[in-house]
Amino acid sequence: MKIVRFNADGATRVGALDGDQVIEFPGVQSTQDLIAGGAAAMDAARKAVASGAGRRPLASVKLLAPVVPATILCSGSNYTDHNKEKANTPISGKEPEFFVKTADCVIGPGDTIVHDERLAKKLDSETELAIVIGKPGRFIPVERALEHVFGYTIVNDVTARDRQVRRNAQGFTWYELGRGKAFDCSAPLGPCIVTTDEIPDPQALRLRTRINGDLRQSASTGNMIFSCAQLIHFFSVNFTLRPGTVIITGTPGGTAWSVDPELGGKWVGGDGSEPLVPAKGYLKPGDTIECELEKIGVLRNVVGSA
């Protein structure tokens, strides 16, 4: 099932995406409530879909981010080809890179990513598979980790590279992940959450990014250094993972960083699975970004001036 949040008749609603239509779930106040409701809530949702009541044309509603988590737990440096194209820190690829984004970062499908040079002149885009937790837990073992997943969605980990990447005269590189990663509009999320019955293996999905129609990223999620199950275990050591918690899993090669030698970038061309178009520079107002994940769909956003 594809779970969506949407605005219709001035109210926010939760429902299912069915082709070019949405079906409202009656009485569901938020996606977190649906997820926390477990099997009983999902049975009621399936009955709503089967009945067809509350069905509306997709074109008549405004899709929102399907969930707005209080905290997004983020892992960077998690694809080998991305590590080859960028300046690396001593731990890159050796352990999960840990940072967070907040609800303040989240925008939905079709919303504008604001380009504000007072924050950053080097704004970059990263398509990532996002895990949505369904069952709470802490110290979750790897072999049981996927049992805690409700579904999967797409996040664009928008990054201020000139805030993130720091280098000294001796060539040592470190990251300032707070200011470089967490800011308004830095976590476009959506367009839907696809439940685990439709994605039994999250390591077998094709990920792509297109900017103004150019294919910038293409890789299999099987190329992750740390799998979804390993990341769930990793983050659950620090936090009790709760229904609606979102974990993002890193991005593959093809970022604009790769064509920026000033910040230690070097063009590699992704993992070789498809020919990529090198970026001509960083994001600029007027750009259209399409973040695509197999079985989930396309998250589309535009870049606008402050």
Image (cartoon, rainbow, N blue to C red):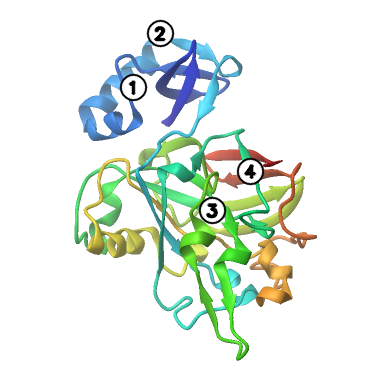
User: Is disc 3 placed on a helix, strand or loop?
Assistant: loop
Calculate the distance from the C-alpha at mark 1 to the C-alpha at mark 4.
Answer: 37 Å
- Between discs 3 and 1, the one toward the N terminus: 1
Residue shown at the point (72%, 48%) measured from the top left: 211
The residue that disc 4 covers is: 114
User: Is disc 4 placed on a helix, strand or loop?
Assistant: strand
Q: How many marks?
A: 4
Query: Label 1 near label 3: C-beta < 8 Å?
Result: no
User: Left or right of 155: which side holds 273?
Assistant: right
Q: Residues within 10 Å of mark 1 (few under 14, many from 20)?
A: few
- Between discs 1 and 4, the one toward the N terminus: 1
Q: Residues within 10 Å of mark 2 (few under 14, many from 20)?
A: few
The residue that disc 1 covers is: 46
User: Is disc 2 placed on a helix, strand or loop?
Assistant: loop
The residue that disc 3 covers is: 157
Q: Nearer the viewer, residue 248 or 143?
A: 248
Query: Label 4 near label 1: C-beta < 8 Å?
Result: no
Residue 40 in view in this figure: yes
Q: Nearer the viewer, residue 177 or 82?
A: 177
On the image, the x and y values in percent for residue 278 come to 77, 63
Calculate the distance from the C-alpha at mark 4 to the C-alpha at mark 3.
Answer: 14 Å
Q: Residues within 10 Å of mark 4 (few under 14, many from 20)?
A: some
Against 78, residue 62 (above or below) is: above
On the image, the x and y values in percent for residue 241 come to 25, 51
- Between discs 4 and 2, the one toward the N terminus: 2
Quadrant housing residue 40: top left
Against 39, residue 95 (above or below) is: below
Residue 266 in view in this figure: no
On residue 53, which mark appears? 2
Indicate the amino acid at tag 2.
Answer: Ala
